[in-house]
Amino acid sequence: MADELNNTSRRAFLKGGAAAVVGTAAGAASAGTPDPLITEVQDWASFTGEGVDETPYGLPIEFESDVVRRNVPWLTADPISSINFTPIHALDGTITPQGCAFERHHSGAIELKKDDYRLMINGLVDQPLVFTYEDLERFPRENHVYFCECAANTGMEWAGAQLNGVQFTHGMIHNMEYSGISLRALLNEAGLGAAGDLADKWVYVEGADASSNGRSIPMEKALDDVLVAFKANGEALRKEHGYPVRLVVPGWEGNMWIKWLRRIEVTDAAVESREETSKYTDVMEDGTARKWTWEMDAKSVITSPSPQMPIKHGHGPLVISGLAWSGHGRITRVDVSKDGGKSWETARLGTTQGDSKALTRFYLDTDWQGEDWLLQARAMDETGYVQPTKDQLREVRGENSIYHNNCIQTWYLNAKGEAENVEVS
Ligand SMILES: Nc1nc2c(c(=O)[nH]1)N[C@H]1C(S)=C(S)[C@@H](COP(=O)(O)O)O[C@H]1N2
Ligand SMILES: [Mo]
């Protein structure tokens, strides 16, 4: 691997001319004009910096001020029932900082103090219970990294390539390390004896906001890996992500991840609430609707180069980078195509076997000499599932769906290194 990289650099260097200036990947400053950034003592080395008491809680440096959530104003009528998008084009690694992780609210982000927080468990339990925030902290705690993807992510692309930026086509996703307690522990505390046979039971979960966003979750999932979480990436949840407590439903659509969680009712049937009937269900090719699609199928996308991340460094070594994830478990392989899916190269996974149902970073270390490329990524997960093309997905789902679009995305890269959202068939 090291040899391969050396060869790439040497090749780029030897191709000469244009490559031999400051800032190429070959790293070579040629003889000639001295670089004042090296030869002159700069301000930042002449004066002292800021003291440690200036910034009790740090924000990103001002030069990174474009790495922010963005929205698409025409998408929803009102910002309190709206979404914004994670700037995935500008991030690397896998963890999403809370400050730029997408938000989706049905009735705005509410402010709920820990002291005012109550969580009720009722319905078919032996003993209905109410927990305060401090009560919850006394249960055994777990830490897991999981992605949360809104079912509507990529939902504007069904009928054609539309939004020119990976932030907008794929940015309704974030990936955080959650600290919390298992829902199983809380249900057992209330006692499930009264529920009888658990195989056909459900929990109905709702939030403290005006929308309440109620959803029914089959008992099997509730007793599996669902978390009642109060920390994300080590610190308290931000208001917009459900402070002080949210539900984490690994691998399942974001809508079920109830924020400001206030009630868990054990029931003997799904409630069939608004959010699981008129919304978040899929219209199929023949016009009928499929009842429930909880798990998010394997999906991947190239984040750089992409429409918001053109190639700026000229010809030579190029790192193609992106994200892959699956609600069914681990990502086992990601392939990258430069010719719209005719041929594929296997990418390098940039994370050692991380948590299942979490984002995986991939890289293809390659070389670009100004060719036109039709860039695609294709993910495979541990169940053997392969991410479908747009045409394959449309054969089953038609073009009138909104939710659960996990098709292969194409970027057209031109000779200038600019990328555009396109479709191939
Ligand atoms: N209480 C409550 N929970 C909610 C919502 C909401 O509006 N209210 N929105 C849901 C939807 S549709 C999604 S995609 C996720 C988004 O989580 P985030 O805002 O932390 O990104 O929260 C879900 N949980
Ligand atoms: Mo969502």
Image (cartoon, helix red, strand yellow):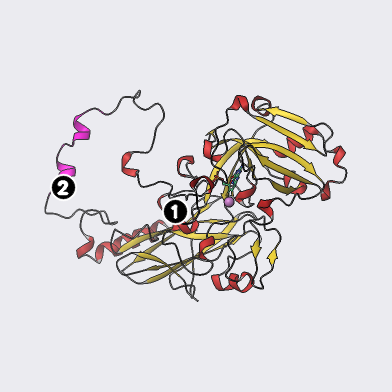
Question: In terms of depth relative to the viewer, which is nearer, 383 or 79?
Answer: 79
Look at label 1 and name its amino acid. Pro
Question: Horizontally, is 130 left or right of 349 in the view?
Answer: right
Question: Horizontally, is 256 left or right of 31 in the view?
Answer: right
Location of residue 381 in the rendering, given as x and y in whole percent from the top left corner = 61, 59
Q: Of discs 2 and 1, which sits in the foreground?
A: 1
Give ligand 1's quarter of the image.
top right
Location of residue 201 in the rendering, given as x and y in whole percent from the top left corner = 81, 47
Query: In the picture shown, does residue 343 fall above or below 240?
Result: below
- What's the mark number on residue 35? 2
Q: Residue at x 50, y 76 (%)?
A: 425
Which segment is the magenta one?
33-49
Q: Which residue is mark 1?
A: 73
| Element type where label 2 sits in the image | loop
Mark 2 CB in 8 Å range of ligand 1? no
Q: Residue at x 57, y 28 (%)?
A: 113
Q: Using the numbered discs, state the Cα–Cα distance from disc 2 to disc 1 in whole angstroms.
A: 45 Å
Location of residue 303 in the rendering, given as x and y in whole percent from the top left corner = 44, 57
Membership of 47 in magenta stretch: yes
| Element type where label 1 sits in the image | loop
Membership of 173 in magenta stretch: no
Question: In terms of depth relative to the viewer, which is nearer, 405 or 23?
Answer: 405
State the image quarter where residue 112 is shown: top right
